[in-house]
Image (tube, rainbow, N blue to C red):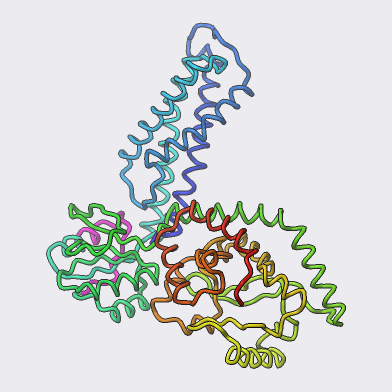
Amino acid sequence: MKKRSELFFSAIQVPMDAAMILLAALSAFAIRNIPEILALKPKLYNFPLESYLNIILTIIPLALFIYAMEGLYNIKVTRKFWQEAMKVFSATSIVLVVIIVTIFLKREWFSSRFIILAGWVLTVVYVTIGRYALQKIQKHLLETRGVGVHRLLLIGRNGKMDQILKLIKHNAALGYKIVGHMEAGSIRAVRELKERKGVDEIIVCDALLTDEEQEKLIDYCAINNISYKFIPTKLQTAKFEAGIFNGEPIIEIRHTPLEGWGKILKRTFDIISSSILIVILSPLMLLVSLLIKFESLFENRKGAPIIYKNERIGSDGKKFNVFKFRYMKWEFCTDPNTKEGKKALEYEKELIEKLSIKKGPLYKIKNDPRKTKVGAFIERFSIDELPQFFNVLFGDMSLVGPRPHQEREVEKYNEYHRRLLTIKPGVTGMAQVSGRSDLEFEDEYKLDVFYIENWSLWQDIQICLKTALVLFRKRKN
């Protein structure tokens, strides 16, 4: 599990590098304009600062892209400085070559060899200094305040594990804190330790651990956002990342690609897309709001709200309010803690028993008599869910993910169903484009778990595009 501090420091490297490259370019430009200090010949070429800046602002995204390709934005709490400095030198040199080739082909760019070489040297120096400062701040917070420390549980007692234990205890800069060392991987013992001390990562090296026990432990870790790593005795899955720890091969099971930069990328996509969709769909949302308001006035329900807040369970079991256009009569959408709300809940339970057409934890009421005329239309085409784009913008939901369920539905989950709570719920998802609300819960669960384990940004884009087409397909119920 990637710590928030690790995500923050990795994300801030991008604007930091961009600022350092810009500063290096401006420094090179300024130095060139001080011939007295450098004792150089008079300048052969003159070009305005504005034109120069336009070129630099074109180069910066290219440089950041090459830095990313060279692995300079890999998320890791502890890094060797000299290795990072060499990577900065190598990546910046590639950028230099690209600039030289571009200038050869595009003569209208500046032709100052001094600025090119000075910019290259200063960029290496400035970017390295910036990263060194960030690394020192990160390590200081790690060692003095425990920010970013991973609480580690070791399972298995043998020479290899004893070496790892000794290494971590004598090297705080590795970013680990040993919270337990067990001989066997008992789920009950792991759960008790997690509740008492918290666990972020587990390293297993136990030849006696059966495949079934290991599978249960992997599922438990996935549900509770715990990184699972093992020094292999048996390889049970292809979804892994291999590495070296203290000279030993170590394998980490990947619960989902939605960690590290995947998480940052998905959140960025959510913010940009939800903002655009809110702007584009605002006339439709305004029209629906007016229709709901007029219908309420016609039925003498002046105080009836347009937006209904429905409490759901989100990632990590946190409660939040889903925004929806109210498609039911107001007496059936009231606060469940009030007298009227309790009556509405009792009536809903009766309808579920008599008219629900779904099996498992979820319910789906056929021909729900509580809908208004406007509500029946907007619910049929999922227009009632448009306000959930604000949930996405605020960070409670994602555009794509498992649908959020009510607490009473989550209480009926089997333990393995809780994997649905390991990522943010979505406005739409793989289950919705495969069958919308017509799928049985177990089939919906399988599709959502496949999505969690195989996430990609392109897949999110495809699901969003398919959702737009599926909305106009009539539901079976």
Percent x, y of residue 51: 62, 22
- Residue under the point 87% across and 78% down: 298
Residue range in magenta is 167-182
Using residue 75 as the reference point, say whether residue 433 is left or right of it. Answer: right
Eyeballing the image, is 120 above or below 18? above
Percent x, y of residue 370: 71, 84
Percent x, y of residue 346: 64, 93
Q: Nearer the viewer, residue 443 or 163?
A: 443
Q: Nearer the viewer, residue 288 or 345?
A: 288
Which quadrant of the rendered structure holds the C terminus? Answer: bottom right
Eyeballing the image, is 95 above or below 344? above
Percent x, y of residue 447: 45, 67
Q: Nearer the viewer, residue 70 or 279?
A: 279
Q: Nearer the viewer, residue 257 or 316?
A: 257
Which quadrant of the rendered structure holds the N terminus? Answer: bottom left
Q: Is residue 173 magenta?
A: yes
Q: Is residue 380 magenta?
A: no
**Residue 146 visible from this viewpoint:** no
